[in-house]
């Protein structure tokens, strides 16, 4: 059969790779024809509420008019131009906005293509900084278990060593230093006992290899892909002090949590400290076009710039793509132009109330909510395909991973739509 005889779905199943799938044994896949607001529409006309915000990025809803308008306008004047030796208003306007909303000490902005690349950039910056400071042995990283930082090589090396891809790529990933995830959860009382708050182990690991470690990277407060785990922000305050003591840079990966998702604009809203390097992505463009950024403080910028060669060795073709910059600026204007905290707080309260019944279900291990993140943790792993099939019958798109049935709804979700999402989650928790 020739390629032209294949239906669109047959072509997809035979020729297109999907995320984390077997290309020769593809799972069920559905053709999406269009999207608007809360909904994605399949080719058979089925409309589904996107309870995943399309992998956590579509916070203002699909095909948001302000964002699509900004992209259209930009498309008609300057869709792209190289950023080497050139600059443009979209990059500058977005930069101003980022400085306005992000933690005060982060003053330098590196625009890049995706979350994983922004992590690569952060790690490269940390190594160049340490080398510039005269610490040429410092090229490894420390991180916490259950983390996820992306699928590129360096990012993968700091993903969880058990649930990540370390075993598959044994020998090919850089050696890094892992400590337990912070043991005290966000809703538990902090204890200063270092044996119980995770800091004794962190100190021991960082001190033992301080001459090799360039940076300590972690997802602050919320670990996403690694388990939807919410931990106590005091860990971050203490980690900052420890990093300062040992000359190790602190890197926050806020690709999943940035821009209000947790109920704070950034994790720095929960703690008293700021990172040396911050990675942002996903919600940056409100989910309309791939984009990310790595921000640093002056110390890192001046360290890297003052070293030899001084130049930072990274520069993607599509760096500061004007379409992406325009989308991101429009998305940030939308966010800061509304009572986002009130909106996310209301979503959180409703999810807390509506997901609570799951606590009594036999197969449920835990129910937790932080900002616009609602999680039912099961005692067993859940099949994403089976979950999708059942949620679909209820008009909701849910795609659990591991043991977690979860939602990260768009901020525009109405109370009725949110009730449809939580009803779908409760059904999955009961039936799967
Ligand atoms: N870091 C975190 C915390 C993430 O959640 C993700 C994506 N799930 C990434 C990095 C990688 O981002 P991307 O998929 O855009 O490369």
Image: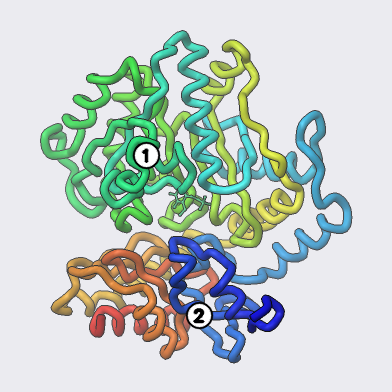
Ligand 1 neighbours mark 1 (CB distance < 8 Å): no
Where is residue 409? Give x, y as percent.
Answer: 46, 70
The residue at 50%/75% (across/down) is 50
Q: Quadrant of residue 94?
A: top right
The residue at 49%/49% (across/down) is 255
Q: Are marks 1 and 2 in contact (CB under 8 Å)?
A: no
Q: Quadrant of residue 393?
A: bottom left
* Above or below 102: residue 48: below
Task: Name the mark on residue 141.
Answer: none
Name the quadrant of the C terminus: bottom left
Disc 2: CA contacts within 10 A as few (<14), some (14-19) or many (>=20): many
User: Which residue of the protein is positioned furthest toward the front in this rendering?
Assistant: 1
- Left or right of 60, for residue 85: right
Q: Quadrant of residue 209?
A: top left
Q: Closer to us: mark 1 or mark 2?
A: 1
Where is residue 398? Give x, y as percent.
Answer: 42, 75
User: Which residue of the protein is positioned furthest toward the right in this rendering?
Assistant: 77
Task: Name the mark on residue 158.
Answer: 1
> Quick check: can you spot residue 311?
yes
Disc 1: CA contacts within 10 A as few (<14), some (14-19) or many (>=20): many
The residue at 52%/53% (across/down) is 259
| Residue highlighted by disc 2 | 49
Name the quadrant of the N terminus: bottom right
Disc 1 and disc 2: Cα gap in Å? 33 Å
Where is residue 386? Give x, y as percent.
Answer: 35, 80
Ligand 1 neighbours mark 2 (CB distance < 8 Å): no
> Quick check: can you spot residue 220?
no
């Amino acid at each position: 059969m020739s390629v032209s005889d294949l239906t669109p779905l047959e072509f997809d199943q035979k020729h297109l790779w999907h995320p984390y799938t077997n290309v020769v044994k593809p799972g069920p896949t559905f053709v999406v024809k269009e999207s608007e607001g809360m909904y994605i529409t399949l080719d058979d006309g089925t409309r589904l509420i996107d309870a995943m915000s399309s992998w956590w990025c579509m916070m203002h809803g699909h095909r948001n008019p302000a964002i699509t308008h900004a992209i259209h306008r930009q498309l008609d004047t300057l869709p792209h131009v190289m950023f080497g030796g050139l600059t443009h208003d979209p990059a500058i306007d977005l930069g101003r906005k980022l400085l306005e909303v992000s933690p005060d000490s982060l003053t330098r902005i590196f625009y890049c293509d995706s979350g994983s690349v922004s992590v690569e950039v952060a790690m490269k910056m940390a190594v160049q900084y340490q080398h510039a400071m005269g610490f040429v042995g410092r090229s490894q990283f420390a991180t916490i278990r259950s983390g996820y930082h992306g699928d590129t090589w360096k990012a993968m090396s700091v993903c969880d060593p058990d649930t990540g891809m370390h075993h598959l790529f044994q020998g090919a990933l850089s050696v890094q230093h892992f400590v337990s995830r912070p043991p005290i959860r966000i809703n538990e009382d902090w204890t200063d006992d270092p044996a119980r708050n995770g800091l004794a182990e962190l100190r021991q690991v960082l001190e033992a290899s301080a001459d090799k470690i360039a940076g300590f990277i972690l997802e602050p407060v919320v670990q996403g892909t690694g388990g939807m785990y919410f931990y106590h922000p005091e860990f971050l305050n203490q980690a900052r002090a420890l990093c300062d003591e040992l000359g190790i840079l602190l890197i926050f990966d806020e690709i999943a949590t940035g821009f209000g998702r947790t109920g704070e604009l950034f994790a720095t809203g929960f703690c008293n400290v700021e990172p040396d390097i911050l990675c942002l992505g996903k919600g940056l463009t409100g989910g309309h076009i791939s984009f990310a950024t790595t921000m640093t403080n002056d110390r890192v910028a001046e360290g890297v710039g003052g070293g030899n060669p001084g130049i930072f060795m990274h520069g993607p073709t599509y760096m500061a793509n004007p379409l992406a910059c325009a989308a991101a600026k429009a998305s940030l204007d939308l966010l800061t132009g509304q009572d986002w905290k009130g909106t996310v707080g209301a979503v959180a309260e409703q999810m807390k109330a509506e997901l609570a019944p799951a606590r009594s279900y036999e197969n449920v291990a835990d129910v937790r909510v932080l900002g616009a993140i609602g999680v039912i943790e099961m005692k067993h792993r859940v099949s994403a395909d089976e979950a999708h099939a059942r949620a679909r019958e209820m008009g909701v798109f849910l795609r659990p991973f591991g043991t977690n049935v979860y939602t990260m709804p768009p901020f525009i979700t109405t109370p009725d739509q949110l009730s449809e999402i939580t009803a779908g989650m409760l059904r999955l928790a009961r039936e799967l």
